[in-house]
Amino acid sequence: MSRTLSAPVTVAFDYTRSTGPVLGRFLTGLRDGVVVGGRTSDGEVVVPPPEYDPVTHAATTDFVEVSPTGTVASWSWVAEPVAAQPLDRPFAFALVLLDGATRPFLHALDVASPGDVATGMRVQVRWRAQRTGAITDIECFEPVTDQAAPPPGPRSTLDPVTGVVTPVALDYTYAASPEESAFYRGLAEGRVLGQRCPTCAKVYVPPRSACPADGTPTTDEVELSQTGTVTTFCIVNVPFLGQRITPPYVSAYVLLDGADIAFLHLILDVPADQVRMGMRVEAVWKPREEWGTTIENISHFRPTGEPDAAYDTYSQHL
């Protein structure tokens, strides 16, 4: 068995942005199967259109439809695409100067190998079958062929694009320290383990490799009580993507009996407006068959019914 634990972690959220009139015009065009650029005060035609003129700083109002066909100005080969890139196979990122534009436009170019792409080659837009008003409505560029590209479908500008939602995600592997690994393995056995600093005698949970107060390695393992005291808390009233509990609910720092640092968990089985500092709580574990090496083995904390702890007993742990 490995001394340390590790696990894949994904942090993700949807980034929502209003487009404004200029980018909205560009994205509405993509949805309708046309490429829209903006003409600046010095006569440049830029795709996508800039929101403000780079010379006068006035808002862009002169829009130009440009051709979906253009010329590769430069390119870079992507041998190993990563998740969420335009194509899931090797491809080129290319700057394409669309006919009618004066500034190149960056997008993916679908070719089989670096030998199939060259500066100066003629390429055309490959439209996505279902378009929503996003840059991904252009699936990619492809070499111009004798066969004309299929028409993008009927145009409609009755419902302009005013906002976009972009999923953002970060995948990484979390590697726990030996001390954290012992903590997680303890949870898999129904125990909460901390470590004591041999110098100042403070007990940390989850344990750290060294005491943050004096730097001494925390080598003494301590099994902690599963009851504790709410030191601080907040009531969550705002819903968000992926939320597992319907608001309002309470997220609180719980100082376990025998510990010197509180850790964050949920307080349930009590109305949110009745949770308070000093409330005595106990751990509620999930059914044993659902346990793993995770803090989620503890479903939540709930009131024990004991009298509240005196402020002086936890004031040094806020």
Image: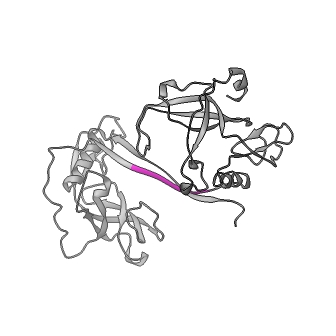
> Which is nearer the eye, 200 or 121?
200
Q: Could you say which quadrant of the image residue 69 lies in?
A: bottom left
In the rendered image of this protein, does residue 75 appear above or below residue 197?
below
Image quadrant in which the N terminus is located: bottom right
Residue 207, image x, y percentages: 72, 46
> Which is nearer the eye, 198 or 158?
198
How is colour applied across the structure in the image? one colour
Q: Is residue 229 left or right of residue 130?
A: right
> Which is nearer the eye, 35 or 64?
35
Extent of the magenta region: 167-174
Residue 27, image x, y percentages: 26, 49
- Report how many numbered discs are placed on residues in the image: 0
Image quadrant in which the C terminus is located: top right
In the rendered image of this protein, does residue 165 appear above or below residue 107?
above
Q: Residue at x 29, y 41 (%)?
A: 41
Q: Residue furthest front?
A: 305
Q: Is residue 272 magenta?
A: no
Q: Residue at x 48, y 24 (%)?
A: 273
Residue 214, image x, y percentages: 82, 38
Q: Is residue 164 left or right of residue 286?
A: left
Residue 71, image x, y percentages: 31, 65
Magenta segment's dominant SS is strand
Q: Residue furthest right?
A: 199
Q: Could you say which quadrant of the image residue 256 lies in?
A: top right
